[in-house]
Image (cartoon, rainbow, N blue to C red):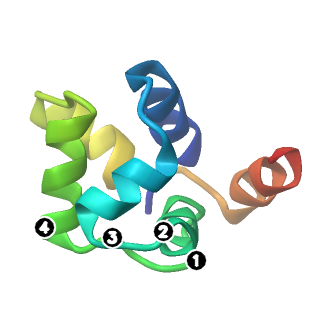
Amino acid sequence: MVDTQKLCKRIDESGLKKYYIASKVGLTTYGLQKKINNQTQFKANEIEELCIMLKIKTLEEKEKIFFAKNVGKMETKKLQKKE
């Protein structure tokens, strides 16, 4: 499960726009947002491309963002309401 907060923070820090990121990963902006919000899952190649674009270099950081175990759906729903 994706840690939505950490991933959104990395996207914000990168200065890249979500539509640009989505196009580079081969998704629509809506499709990317669904994956960020844990409504659908990222594919391995999408994760790899995101790590390159967002400069996520360590396996530890990658696991904390894309393979979080303690992230609940409630956190994701709270973030959706803020957007």
Q: Amino acid at mark 4?
A: Asn
Q: Residues within 10 Å of mark 4 (few under 14, many from 20)?
A: few
Q: Nearer the viewer, residue 11 or 29?
A: 29
- As drawn, the label of residue 45 is 4
**Mark 3 in CB contact with mark 2 (< 8 angstroms):** yes
Q: Residue at x 20, y 27 (%)?
A: 55
Q: Earlier in the sequence, mark 1 or mark 4?
A: 1
Q: Residue at x 46, y 40 (%)?
A: 7
Q: Position of residue 18 (x, y in %)?
A: 49, 48
Q: Residue 35: give its label.
A: 2
Secondary structure of the residue carrying tag 4 is: helix
Residue 19 locus on image (x, y percent): 48, 54
Q: Indicate the position of residue 56 as horizontal and vertical percent values.
A: 20, 31
Which residue carries the number 3 mark?
Answer: 42
Front one among 57 and 71: 57
> In the structure shown, which secondary structural element does the residue marked by tag 1 occupy?
loop
Q: Nearer the viewer, residue 22 or 61?
A: 22
Q: CA distance from mark 1 to mark 4?
A: 18 Å
Q: Which amino acid, by three-letter code, is at mark 1?
A: Gln
Above or below, 21 against 17 in this view is: below
